[in-house]
Structures are given as C-alpha cells and as structure tokens.
Amino acid sequence: MSKHVKVVPHEIKPSGGSSGGNVDNGKICAALAYILIGIIWFFVDENMKKNAFAKFHVKQGLVLLVLSIGLWIVMAILGAIFSILFFFAPMLGFGLMRLISLIGLIPLVLCIIGIVYALQGKEKQLPIVGQYADKFNI
C-alpha cells in the first residue's frame, strides 16, 4: 500500500527575520527611504516606526544621505581647486573635473541598488556603506 504525501512549499522569508506582512506593509516606505521621502514618512508615521523592514532601509537611506552630503562638499572643494588648475594645465584640469563627475555618481548607483533591494523585500546591506547603518539608533 503506497502512501501519498502532499508537499507544501514553505514560505520564504526575507533575510533579517522580518515577517511577510511586515515587509509588505513597509515596502513602499523602504523604497522611498533612498530618496528622502521615505525617511520623512518613517519619522512621521507611527506604524512605520514599528516596522523592522522599513527601519532597516531608513537606516541605509540615512547613511546614503550623509554620504551624499559629505561627497557633495568634497566635490565642491575639489571642483574649485581643479577649475583653478584648468587655467594652468587645461587637459589635466579637464580630466580631473571628469573624474569628480564620475565619483558623484556613486550615491546614485547605491540609491538604485537600495530601491531594488527594498522592492524585492530584501534586507540586504548596501555595498561599501551599508555596514555603517547599524550605528544609527532610531
């Protein structure tokens, strides 16, 4: 006599131990956290403050915001220096200005990666800067 066993697939939970409903409720806020709107939403909405998935991505978004502001300041200073250099050595000054422009794309790329992770329901740290998110205590 053969027994039939019904196999039921298990629900896959995102890393970090968040429950599926928690992820679904915070997914939009988490994705918007990388463009500042979600950070504001998180601090205004009490339900989002309780959502671990949204909190994870808001912390990542805050790190990215601090990085962007710091990088912007450094790029402004270096841009001023290299523009003066442009008058004395045009090709060198032009090349260094282009290099600064490419470095300025780093926060944009990280922002896109964070949004994709959030929309996929993953609690995955951003490359390079994600490790610093744990230092924020919100």
Image (tube, rainbow, N blue to C red):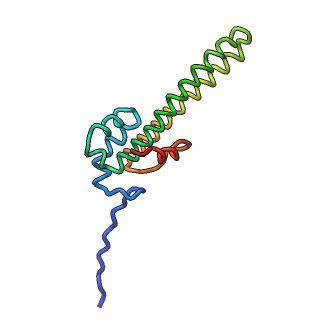
Residue 107, image x and y in percent? 51, 33
Q: How many marks?
A: 0
Question: Which residue in the rendered view is the most extreme toward the bottom?
Answer: 1
Please state which of residues 2 and 135 is positioned toward the viewer in this rendering: 135
- Give the quadrant of residue 12: bottom left
Q: In what quadrant of the picture does the C terminus appear?
A: top left
Residue at (33%, 67%) from the top-left corner?
A: 9
Residue at (67%, 20%) from the top-left corner?
A: 95
Question: Which residue in the rendered view is the most extreme toward the right?
Answer: 89
Residue 13, image x and y in percent? 37, 59
Q: In what quadrant of the picture does the N terminus appear?
A: bottom left
Question: Which residue in the rendered view is the most extreme toward the front?
Answer: 137
Please state which of residues 93 and 65 is positioned toward the viewer in this rendering: 65
* 124 lies above or below 40: below
Residue 60, image x and y in percent? 45, 42
Residue at (35%, 46%) from the top-left corner?
A: 54
Residue at (40%, 44%) from the top-left corner?
A: 57
- Give the quadrant of residue 92: top right
Q: Is residue 90 left or right of residue 41?
A: right
Q: Is residue 124 left or right of residue 13?
A: right
* 10 lies above or below 22: below
Q: Is residue 128 left or right of residue 117?
A: right
- Give the quadrant of residue 118: top left
Residue 58, image x and y in percent? 39, 41
